[in-house]
Image (spheres, coloured by chain):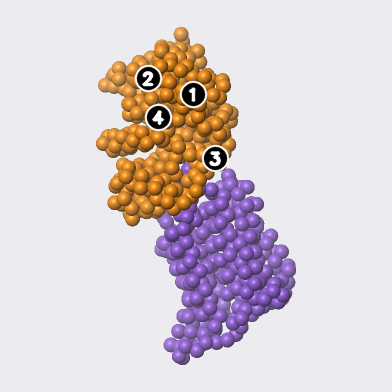
Chain colours: A purple, B orange
Amino acid sequence: MTTFLELLVNGVSIGAVYALIALGFVIIFRATEVVNFAHASLLLAGGYVVARLHPSIGFWAALAAGVAAAAAVGALVEFLIIRRANTASHGVLAIVTIGVDIVLTTELTRRIGTDVLALGDPWRDRVVRLGPVSVAETRLVALAVAAALIAAFLLAFRHTGWGVAMRATAEDAEAAALMGVRRGRVSMGAWAVAGALAAVAALFLCVFPTPGLDRGTAFAAMKAFPAAILGGLDSTTGALAGGLVIGVTETLVTGYQNDLAFLGRGAGDVAPFLVMVVVLLIRPAGLFGTKEPARV
Amino acid sequence: MEARRQEARTDAHDSPPPAEPRDPPEPARPAGPVRTAEAAEAAEAGLVVRDLAAGYGPVTALRGVSLEVPRGSVVAVLGGNGAGKSTLLRAVSGTLRFHRGGIAAGEVSFGGRRLSGADPSAVVACGVVQVPEGRRIFARMTVAENLRAGALGARGARGRRAAAEARDRVLTLFPVLAERARQRAGLLSGGEQQMLAIGRALMARPVMLLLDEPTLGLAPMAAARIADTVREINAQGTTVLLVEQNAAMALSLARHAYVLEVGEVALSGPAAELAASDEVRRRYLGIGDDPAAPAGGAPATRPALARWPG
């Protein structure tokens, strides 16, 4: 039971981090209808900046710089590539983002090399005991920060002019343009916000118990992809649900690996994708996604 | 054919010449006795479209279209499906690129400011706001959020007070929107959705409203309600360009009207004269036709054929 609770807390925590990544995914998809395969590289870029800067300027300043850098990279990708190719179909743009991802990830992994970079976070490997359950402090912080960021984002999405502009553009870009909404600004904002969220997620993917930022971090980030898909690519609620489902599944399957020996080693890495496939078989639009619009 | 068209045009109205192919941007209007007030307004030009050609890739949708909407007036553009009415409004609002189209030649300006080639948001900032065909409300957002979206591109200070004033005006005009503020817009009836679409556009506090088929698909009662509303909006000082297939309704509202056919201005003149002209009565008001004829298309095409060879 204790093990289960520990795994559950860890799973929810990592799930919240996946939700941050998935949320960025969904924001970009809603604002530009582009599936952003370059998301993992944005995350890697943010994490890399934190890792390189924290020895000289301290952790918090480095984190701010990392978040700003990832947001800037996202905005730049939108401005230099997505906006120029505005007339191309969304499928083509999705493939273009794969190209961006390859370029960015290759350059970053070249710089990282075989190192494992610490991010210099203040929580280190401290463990908190909640009764019989012991949880890494980083996991609790991750959960709290992710929850706060997600809540702030959802409130902004619902109540600010920026959020209304985003939702209007997502629903009907032409009608939104007729209201004077600047599509370029909306889509650039979406990419920047997604980048910033990814950088925060990068931090929590690389802290204890993970050894640090290495070339495999981008792979970990890709687990948020099934989270976004199974939640429904155009649903913010879906991103949260998907993130939690994936996080908990992965942690539980990894934690009970010995009992699930018939699945073989490393089942935890496969489980998220398996869950995604099962969900999509039952609900092709994802848990909260909009079904293909049918005109009545 | 062009000559014939011109002839038909002069037939339609005899008193003030249609001043159609105007060369100078500020045309010296024939300041007849009826038009003195308007002549003063013309000093502050409204919407001027000159020799506009627009299309979608290889398809030309508009050719050499010129029209003018003086400030404070209601001008109607009539025409059947595919006549280029919506293309005209897209060209004004700068949304042709959403349909992979563009302006090939000519110019659109409002109050002396050039709109052609501008971003849709710049057009809205100039005070020219369009209510698109098919209403295009944000169905997944609430009525209140739709109105809020309408104020996003408002001119000048985006102050809360200005937005609140605009909202009060809209809700006075359409009290039903206040009752349904918290509902999803997709749940409104067709007539209510059209009211929301117009109300949303009014949130931008437009100087000029472009209405694309506001009565399309509405019940006669709802259509009459929309017509009253357009009259009231105009009475409050907003210039209106009304694009309609419902010619009877449009001509009853408008002071001046243009008829588009296959992307060109076929007729133009004061609305009352157009409503009285044989051609418009036959082709757009359905008067003088024999709708019960067994070969439905034949009577409609006969007059057109008679004009062509001659």
Badge 4 density bin: few <14, some 14–19, many ≥20, Cα 10 Å:
many
Q: Position of residue A9 (x, y in %)?
A: 48, 80
Is tag 2's residue or tag 1's residue first in the polypeptide sequence?
A: 1
Amino acid type assigned to the residue bearing label 4 in the image: Val
Secondary structure of residue under mark 1: strand
Quarter containing the N terminus of chain A: bottom left
Is tag 4's residue or tag 1's residue first in the polypeptide sequence?
A: 4
Find disc 3 in the rendering and name its residue: B97
C-alpha span from label 4 to label 3: 27 Å
Residue at image position (48%, 26%) is B42
Badge 1 density bin: few <14, some 14–19, many ≥20, Cα 10 Å:
many
Secondary structure of residue under mark 2: helix
Front position among marks 4 and 2: 4
Is tag 3's residue or tag 1's residue first in the polypeptide sequence?
A: 3
Find disc 1 in the rendering and name its residue: B264
Which quarter of the figure has residue B251?
Answer: top left
Is tag 4's residue or tag 2's residue first in the polypeptide sequence?
A: 4
Amino acid type assigned to the residue bearing label 1 in the image: Glu
Find disc 4 in the rendering and name its residue: B74
Secondary structure of residue under mark 3: helix
